[in-house]
Amino acid sequence: MYRTHTCGELTLADLGKEVLLSGWVQKSRDLGGMTFIDMRDRYGITQLTFNSDDNAELRASARELGREYVIKVTGTVIERSSKNLKIPTGEIEIKVTELEVLNSSKLPPFLIEDETDGGEDLRMKFRYLDLRRNTVRNNLILRHKMAQEIRRFLDEQDFLEVETPVLIKSTPEGARDFVVPSRMNPGEFYALPQSPQTFKQLLMVSGFDRYFQIVKCFRDEDLRADRQPEFTQVDCELAFVEQEDILNIFESLVKHLFKKLKNIDFDRFPRMDYADAMRLYGSDKPDIRFGMQFVELNDLVQSSGFPVFDNAELVVGINADNCASYTRKQLDELTNYVKRSQIGATGLVYLRYNTDGSLKSSVDKFYSEEKLRQIAEKFNAKPGDLILMMAGQADKTRKQLNELRLEVANREGLRDKQIFAPLWVVDFPLLEWDEENNRYHAMHHPFTSPKTEDMHLLNTHPEQVRANAYDLVINGVEIGGGSIRIHDGELQSTMFSLLGFSLDEAKKQFGFLMDAFTYGAPPHGGIALGFDRLVSIFAGLDSIRDVIAFPKNNSGRDVMIDSPSNIDEKQLKELAISVNN
Ligand code: ASP
């Protein structure tokens, strides 16, 4: 027998009990004739005491225990003299009578405590040790709870969890595929799913009506903090639904999660058209925890002799509340921020509305005091505010101002991780123009249905056609997205030809789906939520890595198991792959 209790449950109510505990030595300290050991397991920490006066030999063995030794102790629960009220077991300790070492441990490469001295790389290499730490484990507990709540909720709503294959054929989600060579079919490859998109649509043809799956997806993209080559989606599809039904069901799901896991209640989530999101925030995933909406200024500031504004397609700005006190240095920092190559702006124009009511701008010589006042009014600025303006080609400038808006918000502490601002962005364009290849791409994917009222524009102004596509955004992070699908074969063919597929190409890639649709495909639609992102938002973290048990690093490597790695000649040969050609 290893234990009667865990290391997280004994309290004053257990005084006097004889108990058996097993766990790891977190740390030990000697004080006079006493040795104290913090013993840890998944459930918590319990303090053990060894007193020379009671048993000198036992205490001597205790002093030999190193960090992370695995031990089993028998002892009595007694009241602690110096209590630690921060932990549930902090009022008791175990007076040990028997100690058994179950396993020794090498000295771990970093401290396995809440505040560790281990750098990111080291902790990734020894992830199994990092996972012994509370913070990392708690994230995974949250992840587990969220998965359970999602399953419970969707099950109650009649969704069926169905597994779809992992070895498939390329799915058209717009990223690169990871491919797997087929030994039995030399020269041919499977692709790992970027999402179960086509399968879930086939399940609708099969009459499954409501499907979900918490599923790994794979995309061979450049990595960022919120991206991993393999990630998890809550993937869903429903038949006989309209956009409104999907938004309502998944809004209820997300509200349910907020209530259950964070005890937060929400009213209806706001909705915003894609066009407004771009016009007011320069982003299709605006962070609406704070204001600073864009104000367009062309009418007011052009034809005044300031060439940067006069020649711009768009002059647009934001009002940073109470930031008029920014120093020259801070303004230079912001200017340099937007001039970084990742953002690529040429400059930044400011207008300070000083607390004494005076106005000071970086373009004073082109604008009268009266004009500056009109600008300030257009922003509804008050004394103490700072207006920041940018100019240039419209789309680019909006994107750059979006970056500036977020940077100012970061500096001003407006992106509080304990505040949650969900938002539906709807009415995405159906297509997006690909400058490089001179053709349209499906903005969501090629199965997304155009809005009925825009259908007449499909052949004449395809760029103006809006889709029945929607994204769920929380705090400026895209948490999920989906669409109502095309279920009509003819419309699907039109769509493929708009996307530049010949009928042959379309058949080759999606023939199975097009065929299936000739056997009575019901109207259907769906959504996929990024599970890792949802957990990391709930946990108040910036990186999804911290909510994944064994994540990859920024180069897509698992440094713990050292993957990807070479495979030997024999294996390559079997797979009919030659690397040195
Ligand atoms: N398959 C889509 C995605 O992964 C989501 C959907 O349309 O349901 O983004």
Image (spheres, rainbow, N blue to C red):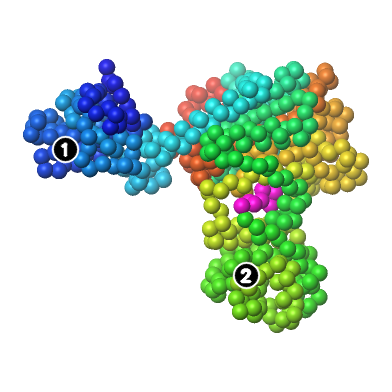
What amino acid is at disc 2? Asp
Secondary structure, magenta segment, majority class: loop
Is residue 192 visible in the rendered image? The answer is no
Q: Is mark 2 within 8 Å of ligand 1?
A: no
523 relative position to 527: left or right: right
Q: Picture quarter containing residue 226?
A: top right
Please determine whether, in this image, residue 93 is positioned above or below residue 401. above
Of residue 555 and residue 358, the one placed in the foreground of this image is 358
Say which element carries label 2.
Answer: loop
- Contact (Cβ within 8 Å) of mark 1 with mark 2: no
Relative to the observer, which residue lies in front, 182 or 310? 310
Q: Residues within 10 Å of mark 1 (few under 14, many from 20)?
A: some
Amino acid type of disc 1? Thr
> Is ligand 1 closer than 8 angstroms to the Cβ of mark 1?
no
- What residue is shown at x 37% (from left), y 38% (from top)? 133
* Residue drawn at the location 77% of the way across and 28% of the way down: 241
Residue 261 is situated, as x and y percent measured from the top left of the image, at: 53, 35
The disc at residue 385 is 2
Q: Which mark is residue 379?
A: none
Residue stretch rendered in magenta on the structure: 283-289
Q: Residue at x 55, y 71 (%)?
A: 326
